[in-house]
Amino acid sequence: MAEQTPKNPEIRDEILDEVREETPDERMMRERLERLDGDEKIPTVVCDGVDIVYRVNGTGAGRGSATAALNRMFRRQQTEKAAGVRKVHAVKKVSFVAYKGEAIGLIGTNGSGKSTLLKAVAGLLPVENGHIYTNGQPSLLGVNAALMNDLTGERNVYLGGLAMGMSREQVKERYQDIVDFSGINEKGDFITLPMRTYSSGMAARLRFSIAAAKDHDVLLIDEALATGDRRFQMRSEERIRELRATAGTVFLVSHNNKSIRDTCERTIWLERGELRLDGPTEDVMKEYEAFTGDKSDKKAGARKAA
Amino acid sequence: MSQVLDTPPPTQAPADDDLAALAARHGLTVSGARPSLSEYIGQLWARRHFITAFATAKLTAQYSEAKLGQIWQVMTPLLNAAVYYFIFGVLLGTSHGVKDYVPFLVTGVFIWTFTQSSIQVGTRAISGNLGLVRALHFPRAALPISFCLQQLQQLLFSMTALVVILLCFGIPVAASWLLAIPALILQFLFNAGMAMIMARMGAKTPDIAQLMPFILRTWMYVSGVMWSIGKLTKKDHLPHIVLVLLENNPAAVYIDLMRYALIDSFHSKQLPPHVWLVAAGWALAVGIGGFIYFWKAEEKYGRG
């Protein structure tokens, strides 16, 4: 964001301020220049004061829930709280701009709203207040929910591909790549067996392979890098780099500080749904590690910096 | 220029107007906004392969753990029919004065089941698949439509069983059997519309799913699944309006159309007047109306 802006405008402004007050013409010129500077970086995702609220039904405590339910049925106009609906304010007034070519890490302790924010950017969760503007349709790297354990791996590849919006021909074209990438068939013909017979590692590998088969403009990755054995993890990271090259902007949610450091130059830190810090990965990480008291990572970070 | 901010929301971001202006200047659009109706239809058409693949996958997954596998697709409706035959045909020996009572009954049960289960799965189409709705981006109407398609496929299996039953009871194969096709298409449109209406209501108020069994059972009893509405019209004790309502009830219309198409002893005299018009009217009104009603809340699906 700001730290990537060239220093020139500031210097120029300082000089202008020092010499004299600017005339209206000069001001117009300066503003136009500034706008041009801004335009050099093309924004792909703009989050503008975003609030996200979940509503959970049936949270009226214990025996009270039956009466709460009756209340809900008969008195529709009353407040949601009285009706036993609890609101969870997951993301609070978050604003940021993501630019083309950036890889942005999202960090924060568990339940701080990272995944929720990602889903809202993907347009999968409605925002309560504020707006999210995007360039095209950002896609979440996640296909798990569309797959069915009772079907064979082969049919799941088709189903997952179609669910992500690929055409039949595209899936057919990439089918062999997906199967090869997943390595499911390395130990025999497993792709024609139902997915419920797979080991958890095998299933995770197949899911990632299906999800990563599509090219995206804005790619949102939620903790997808930690699946499978070491060999598969390396292949996944390779594929993520490829996806980054074709995608305009990549968001990565992870609790693995190393993978954030390796893949992202900019990091956003969310805490209790609020944006704590937004800046270069190393700066944000240092603060975050101090906050979480993660000594080993801090040392590693210090070594890296030195 | 990063800095640790205190708990109050960050101030480093530009004011709201600036961000909106920046987005507008670069032609960014609001994420997850509802597309226009024509765009929506286009998106849905683009996902048609997903809709059919999802329906077929659900259907195949159903019996995948059974040893006999897909044979159950035909066995289940046949066994169902056998139970009805046993109770109404053998035990009670009652036919309510209806000729070919068993084919009459089984046709009614199968056609009613199609509408009933479409509405049931429709009610849970969004609320029962929040994981899918929150994970992937696709026009949400794909879900209720896909579930209805699954029910249609299920019905086609039942129809195979029905043909066996019809032949066993000596019903001749006739050209009128072809009328089953337009009748099924119209019923499918009606069911899909109902499923979309229920999907939106079920997404907002999941409690509806608990009420549906009672509403559906009442609807079944007034739809002439097990008795003939035509017989009632001969009695005078019911006010005329009630008879008109009973006869034009969409479920009854589709059931009677199918009976008329398949059973030779079920005459057109037993059908209400303008029956095809009524069937088409229900299909178009509920199908299109339900689709628009569902689309109106497209951007809201997926919240708690």
Image (tube, rainbow, N blue to C red):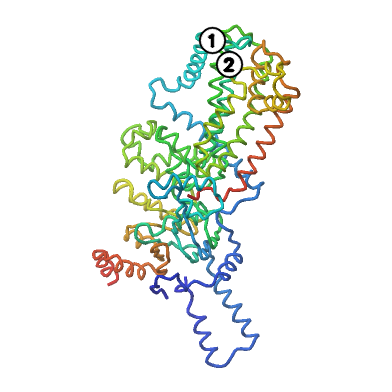
C-alpha span from label 1 to label 2: 10 Å
Looking at the image, which is closer to me, B264 or B146?
B264
Q: Residue at x 55, y 58 (%)?
A: A135
**From the viewer's perspective, is residue A141 above or below residue A129?**
above
For the view shown, which residue lies furthest in the bottom direction? Answer: A19
Q: Report crowding for label 2: few under 14, some 14 to 19, many 20 or more residues within 10 A (C-alpha).
A: many
Q: Quadrant of residue A275?
A: bottom left
Residue B219, x across and y down, in percent: 59, 28
Name the side, left or right, on which A225 lies relative to B104. left
Residue A171, x across and y down, in percent: 49, 40
Are circles 1 and 2 on residues that touch, CB within 8 Å? Answer: yes
Q: Circle 2 — which element?
A: helix
Q: Which residue is mark 2?
A: B105
For the view shown, which residue lies furthest in the front direction? Answer: B237
The amino acid on which the numbered mark 1 sits, given as a three-letter code, is: Gly
The amino acid on which the numbered mark 2 sits, given as a three-letter code, is: Leu
Q: Which residue is mark 1?
A: B89
Q: Quadrant of residue A88?
A: bottom left
Badge 2: chain ID: B
Badge 1: chain ID: B
Looking at the image, which is closer to me, B154 or A150?
B154
Looking at the image, which is closer to me, A82 or A252?
A82
Q: Which mark is residue A280?
A: none
Mark 2 or mark 1, which is nearer the start of the sequence?
Answer: 1
Q: Residue at x 62, y 21 (%)?
A: B224
Q: Circle 1 — which element?
A: helix
Residue B283, x across and y down, in percent: 67, 32
Q: Quadrant of residue A267?
A: bottom left
